[in-house]
Image (tube, grey):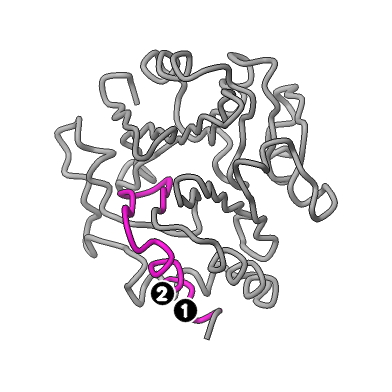
């Protein structure tokens, strides 16, 4: 995941994605993506899920001072320390399970979804709303940027294949065997249902996100959904809504 393989794109005004190749078990192309948002204050919020390579660092420096680094769930933790060491004055916020995983790195966290009281604010809420999925197995957080009508998430929703994330490689980015996984497929509905460890909590949080007015979805895995994002969300989580 070098600078040469990173696709950096402004998907909407003040919203930038950093898309890289990434495969599970060195076999299944899932792709990886970080997202940076320039806040109204001029500061930068980053969902850190890919390496802080030279190209990424250069673009972030161009955008403005990094004020917030967020971990999206219990799984996307690998690069949090790398980002925090590069931006020591930034607030680092992640889910409680991620913080436990990183305790040996000596990182100082400024907030913990799952440990902090419900409704805790971390300073970026005037630009970005968040919903912690306590009932999801990976303990994901969904983020909503109203100014660009964009939802940002990690493992709550997939849109494979990951064409953009592999566009600078020799690979097609297509998933072996079943080829695709998108919100409209039965397989995705099944995945969403199976990942719900607490169905009642899931129903609550799924409906919260469905109530947000977003058109675009930026997933960590797969291509960006540029339009009808709310419809895609409702379809993927249909079994919780109906």
* Residue at (44% x, 67% y) in the render: 233
- Point out the stretch of residues depicted in magenta: 217-240
* Residue at (70% x, 27% y) in the render: 91
Q: Nearer the viewer, residue 151 or 132?
A: 151
How far apart, in angstroms, are the residues tagged by discs 1 and 2?
5 Å
Return the x and y of residue 22 as percentages of the image width and height.
35, 38
Return the x and y of residue 218 as percentages of the image width and height.
41, 48
Structural crowding at the residue carrying mark 2, measured as other residues with C-alpha within 10 Å and reported as few (<14), some (14–19) or many (≥20) = some
Q: Is residue 1 left or right of residue 80?
A: left
Q: Quadrant of residue 66?
A: top right
Q: Is residue 183 above or below residue 112?
A: below
Q: Nearer the viewer, residue 133 or 61?
A: 61
Q: Specify the farthest residue to the bottom.
A: 242
Per the image, label 1 sits on a secondary structure element best described as helix
Per the image, label 2 sits on a secondary structure element best described as helix
Q: Is residue 3 magenta?
A: no
Q: Quadrant of residue 90?
A: top right
* Residue at (17% x, 39% y) in the render: 171
Return the x and y of residue 14 as percentages of the image width and height.
44, 32
Q: Is residue 131 left or right of residue 112?
A: left
Q: Which residue is mark 2?
A: 235
Q: Is residue 12 left or right of residue 52?
A: left
Q: Quadrant of residue 234?
A: bottom left
Q: Is residue 74 above or below residue 192?
A: above
Return the x and y of residue 198 as percentages of the image width and height.
68, 72
Q: Nearer the viewer, residue 23 or 160?
A: 160
Q: Which residue is mark 1?
A: 238
Q: Is residue 226 left or right of residue 177?
A: right
Q: Is residue 223 magenta?
A: yes
Q: Is residue 140 above or below residue 16?
A: below
Q: Is residue 184 above or below residue 35?
A: below
Q: Are marks 1 and 2 in contact (CB under 8 Å)?
A: yes
């Amino acid at each position: 995941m070098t600078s040469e393989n990173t696709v950096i794109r402004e998907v909407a005004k003040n919203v930038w994605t950093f898309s890289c190749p990434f495969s599970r078990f060195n076999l299944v192309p899932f792709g990886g993506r970080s997202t940076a948002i320039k806040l109204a204050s001029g500061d930068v919020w980053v969902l850190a899920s890919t390496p802080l390579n030279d190209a990424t660092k250069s673009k972030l420096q161009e955008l403005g001072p990094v004020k917030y680094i967020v971990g999206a769930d219990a799984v996307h933790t690998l690069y949090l320390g790398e980002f925090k060491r590069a931006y020591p004055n930034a607030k680092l916020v992640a889910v409680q399970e991620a913080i436990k995983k990183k305790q040996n790195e000596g990182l100082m966290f400024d907030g913990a979804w799952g440990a902090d009281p419900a409704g805790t604010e971390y300073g970026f809420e005037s630009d970005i709303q968040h919903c912690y999925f306590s009932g999801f197995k990976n303990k994901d957080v969904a983020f909503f940027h109203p100014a660009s009508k964009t939802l940002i998430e990690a493992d709550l929703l997939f849109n494979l294949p990951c064409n953009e994330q592999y566009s600078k490689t020799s690979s097609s980015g297509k998933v072996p065997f079943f080829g695709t996984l998108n919100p409209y497929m039965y397989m995705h509905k099944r995945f969403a249902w199976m990942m719900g460890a607490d169905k009642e909590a899931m129903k609550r949080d799924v409906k919260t996100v469905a109530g947000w007015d977003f058109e675009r979805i930026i997933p960590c895995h797969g291509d960006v959904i540029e339009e009808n994002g709310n419809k895609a969300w409702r379809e993927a989580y249909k079994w919780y809504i109906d």
